[in-house]
Amino acid sequence: MSGRVSGLVALVTGAASGIGLATSRHLLKSGAKVGAIDISTNLKSTCDALGKEFGSSNIAYLPCDVSDDDALKSAFKETKEQFGSLDIVVNNAGIFDEDNWGKLLKVNLQSVISGTYNAMELMSPDKGGVIVNTASVSGLSPLPFCPAYSASKSGIIAFTKAMKNNLELRGIKIRINSICPAGVETAMVMNAGKVIMSMPQPIIAAATASAGELMKPEFIAEGIMELITDASRNGAILMIEPDKGFTYVE
Ligand SMILES: NC(=O)C1=CN([C@@H]2O[C@H](COP(=O)(O)OP(=O)(O)OC[C@H]3O[C@@H](n4cnc5c(N)ncnc54)[C@H](O)[C@@H]3O)[C@@H](O)[C@H]2O)C=CC1
Ligand SMILES: CCCCCC(=O)/C=C/C=C\C/C=C\C/C=C\CCCC(=O)O
């Protein structure tokens, strides 16, 4: 799968808000059909609004908790059943909740791994497909104010790199890439601010020091679209920062 996305079928997790919503909009605007997965009650109104703008037959409303493997598998199958194929998967849903680190690992890392296996099962062996996993700069340079979150994102990067080689060695025509944004202006960051301010002072100082200007979710969606459409990108880790823009890292 390469080049244009028009007519292709995509699935996006965390589609009700932030980066997932911006990516879903970008895909729909480019002519793809989108299976929109989220746990939020906002998903219905989001899908209705996207349906009005891009055509209700182009968006599938799929309420689902990505940390529930069976529910996630059903939502993947539903997308293929509804639209006839599965070509693009963006494993993007995530939470920032150090106090509930067990849940965090399930949502942020387990769902990316199970989403990748679901994609491998459902994508066409002939046509192939492309997977993009949302990690973070914290997966490249772990941050002291979010150790479990950083570990989940490092895990996504390691999984993406290893799975790229696994797929290549097995001759499976699926590309897999990961995106690593710095701070993005989304609900996650707005809510995290309050939690971080209740941490011990030296940790707050470290967080404040690492916080740069927040980027717009649409800018991150452009990076995800680049990883989807550029057929030369496989096993790519794309870091996105406010001052430097897009940088591919090893
Ligand atoms: N905002 C930021 O600064 C950065 C965010 N990221 C990552 O980007 C991804 C998207 O986050 P944002 O758009 O920033 O946040 P967001 O909070 O706006 O969107 C996350 C979405 O995931 C959904 N979600 C959470 N738990 C879920 C579950 N169990 N099942 C299904 N859906 C679930 C939420 O309902 C929400 O709609 C996350 O993986 C996050 O870790 C990465 C780097 C920076
Ligand atoms: C430097 C942030 C890198 C992005 C990490 C990420 O993937 C998601 C983080 C989510 C929330 C935290 C983001 C930024 C918080 C940084 C500083 C907050 C400082 C507190 C304050 O001064 O309000």
Image (spheres, grey):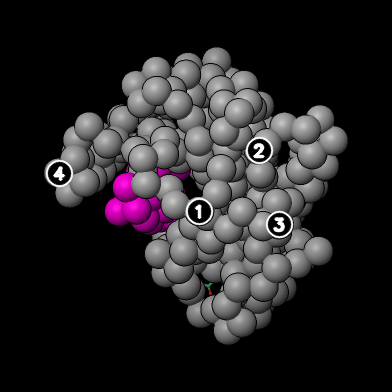
Question: Does the image show residue 19?
Answer: yes
Residue 31 horizontal/vertical position (percent): 32, 47
Q: Quadrant of residue 185?
A: bottom left
User: Which residue has dot 3 on it?
Assistant: 236
User: Which residue has dot 4 on it?
Assistant: 52
Question: What residue is drawn where x is 22% and y is 32%?
Answer: 57
Q: Earlier in the sequence, mark 4 or mark 2?
A: 4
Residue 20 horizontal/vertical position (percent): 43, 49
Which circle, 3 or 1, is nearer the viewer?
1
SS at mark 1 in the image: loop
Q: What's the amino acid at mark 3?
A: Ala
Assess mark 4: CB under 8 A from ligand 1?
no
Q: What's the amino acid at mark 1?
A: Gly
User: Which residue has dot 2 on it?
Assistant: 174
Q: Please, what is the dominant secondary structure of the magenta stretch? A: helix
User: Which residue has dot 1 on it?
Assistant: 3
